[in-house]
Image (tube, helix red, strand yellow):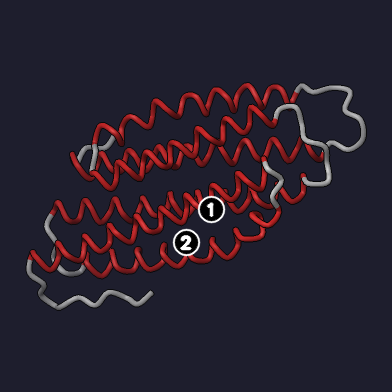
Amino acid sequence: MEAVVYNPNPDSSQLARAIRRLERDVLRMGALVEQSFRLSHQALFARNLIAAEELPKLDKKIDRFYRQIESDCTAIMTQAPTAQDLRCLSAFMQLVRDLERIGDYAKDLAKIAIKLFPYEPHTSLPEIEIMSHHAQAMLATSLVALADLDEAGGRGIKHLDDAVDNAYDRLYQTLAQQRDIPGVVEPIILLALAIRCLERMADHATNIGQRVAYIVTGQRT
């Protein structure tokens, strides 16, 4: 992507257009992150190694968006934006970091899926799959809240996070207390890493919702 070029003294309408372009880029980045999450889900639960192999290429696209958006935000900040514009720009810079981290965790899940492939599916996988669906729904909800600048929708994601946290606690205890494991313990370790990735992805989705609320209200929670 090419850098956005700004005039030395842009008027308010030019700034508004630049910020709208940024918002569109953030949403485009969000769509790529959603796609990466879906691919990691397919790799882990449908044992789809082709999906896993697509993740590194997609992650590079996400990283390019991340760097470009950060650069564009910084460029606009030098053009005397209003306090409200600055609030929006700072939120975007934090928000794309959350998206970038979710993309990284999706890539990690794909690596875990590849390592798990030789083993028989674990009995905890159905519950982990539900956890993954919840985290994906949180990401989708946060991006809808951003597109609509929906404060209530953004803040409401925190309540959805409880289901993921509870699932993480249950699954961790199940995996940690498993006894009489025949053969190697690698699958248990890998699944523990997988649920940690999902828990962190949900946390970053929650952060995105909180940042949307900050854009709208100027109040941090």
Q: Which residue is mark 2?
A: 62
Q: Residues within 10 Å of mark 2 (few under 14, many from 20)?
A: many
Q: Are marks 2 and 1 in contact (CB under 8 Å)?
A: yes
Lateral position of residue 189 relative to residue 171, left or right: right
Horizontal and vertical percent for residue 144?
32, 43
Lateral position of residue 18 relative to residue 33, left or right: left
User: Which residue is at a point 38% across and 74% down the rendered structure image?
Assistant: 1
User: Which residue is at a point 11% across and 57% down the rendered structure image?
Assistant: 82
Q: Which residue is mark 1?
A: 36
Q: Secondary structure at mark 1?
A: helix
User: What distance separates the C-alpha of mark 2 from that of mark 1?
Assistant: 9 Å
Q: In the image, what residue type sits under mark 2?
A: Ile
User: Which residue is at a point 36% across and 41% down the rendered structure image?
Assistant: 142
Q: Secondary structure at mark 2?
A: helix
User: In terms of sequence position, does the residue under pointer 2 or pointer 1 come before the other?
Assistant: 1
User: Which residue is at a point 87% across and 28% down the rendered structure image?
Assistant: 181
Lateral position of residue 167 relative to residue 117, left or right: left
| Picture quarter with the C terminus | top left
